[in-house]
Image (cartoon, rainbow, N blue to C red):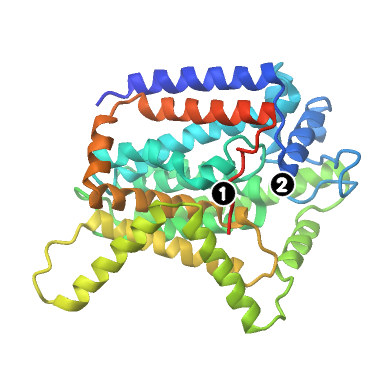
Amino acid sequence: MGRRPGLVAWVLVLAVGVVALAALGYRARDADSRLYAEISARMSEAPAAGWIAPDFPPGWYMSGRFREHPVGLFVPAAALARLGYPPLQAGYALNALYQVLTIVLVQRLAAALVPGPEARALGWLVQLLPIAFTFRIRANHEQAVLLCLVAALYGTERARRRPRWALLTAVALVGLLLVKGVLSVFGPVLCALWLLGRRGAGRGSPPADRAVWAGLAAAVVAMSATAVAYEQLYRQSTGEPFWSIYLARQLGVAAAGAGSGLAAKLYNLAWYLGRVLWFPFPWSLALAIAAWHAGRLRWRLGPASEVGPADPGALAGGLFVAATVVLYVGLFSLSDRRADRYIFPAYYAVGAAGGVAALRAMPRLARLAGSLDRPWVPAAVWAATFAVHLFAGRLGLPTVKVWAP
């Protein structure tokens, strides 16, 4: 199926969405989004040489230099505002672009594991997750983080056959570092988990593992070099360090409640698992049911029996999703500071895998997906949901946040 109609549709709906954000002067209710949009707007009016060290705007919960994260989220928005786009809406416009790119890359990444129709259906299925409605129009980090992670995974997958694609992995992981700082360590770990899960699961003959792993190692070196360069630029601009102050603050927050008991940690675990069930719903339920049935079948018949040929792509994808959930939920359960956004990528991993499981388990859904297998459908779904969220927010209607248990 040709890609050009889909590309044209995406360009058109994205252009209309960006124009609508500017024309309506949209501003989210979310406090972080408003803060980040204001920071990038103020940066756009300052000399570019000082963009690396923005300040908190007046009237916010803190004052002085903004050291909560590196400035990777703000620089593109400030640059867009410099080009003439309304400064306070620039962050929302870029978030829309990040969403679109993520959807496209999710489809292409999934195509390495599952048949084309299922991969293409994810272009609209993942847009219907509760978490997608909650974060539809924001100016905060989560969508940029997800895009960087999916791009890094896609580059890693393509590098299995064409090692030059490791350049995309490096660029995406460097971007992740500049957007999210210390939590960028998830990026190389997830890429490594992807490679481990994909061993022997792909079509054709990928290059030797050594070349792929070398590409990932080079990406880690690029992240380290970027961190060193960032520190030098920050010191030149302010005369102060960045990473030592930033890490002390972030690790201090992460360690909050570290001395609490096992009961508190189990509560955190249950809290995050509840989010993993709800925010990718109903595809999370479909994935759980599929895993349960597969496990029962293997247990009853035994590993040596003729259960049927395993689907290597589905197996690799399932293992990767399980590892992603364990990684995110396990780590953040150790801290008593909880937030839905901390495990944002895990929702999409579960949602995508669950969407495929639902397509295979529900013939009616599969038939619906077949009838909607058109290049322009994901763009149309994005336009419709974006418009509903945009105008609901404009009118003050309570439809922009999805309840979480």
Spatial CA distance of label 1 from label 2 is 16 Å
> Residue 344: horizontal and vertical position, in percent?
55, 52
| Residue 167 seen in the figure | no
**Which image quadrant for residue 10?**
top left
Q: How many marks?
A: 2
The type of residue carrying mark 1 is Ala
> Residue 136: horizontal and vertical position, in percent?
57, 37
Q: Which residue is mark 1?
A: 222
Viewer-proximal residue, 369 or 334? 369
Report the residue at 72% width, 81% height from top. Answer: 259
| Residue 45 seen in the figure | yes
Please say if 129 is above or below 45: below
Viewer-proximal residue, 388 or 331? 388
The reply, left or right, for residue 360 in relation to residue 249 is left
Give the label on residue 119, or none.
Answer: none
Numbered disc in front, either 1 or 2: 2
Report the residue at 35% width, 58% height from top. Answer: 287
The reply, left or right, for residue 289 in relation to residue 186 is left
Q: Quadrant of the C terminus?
A: bottom right
The type of residue carrying mark 2 is Pro
Q: Which residue is mark 2?
A: 70
> Residue 279: horizontal and vertical position, in percent?
51, 52
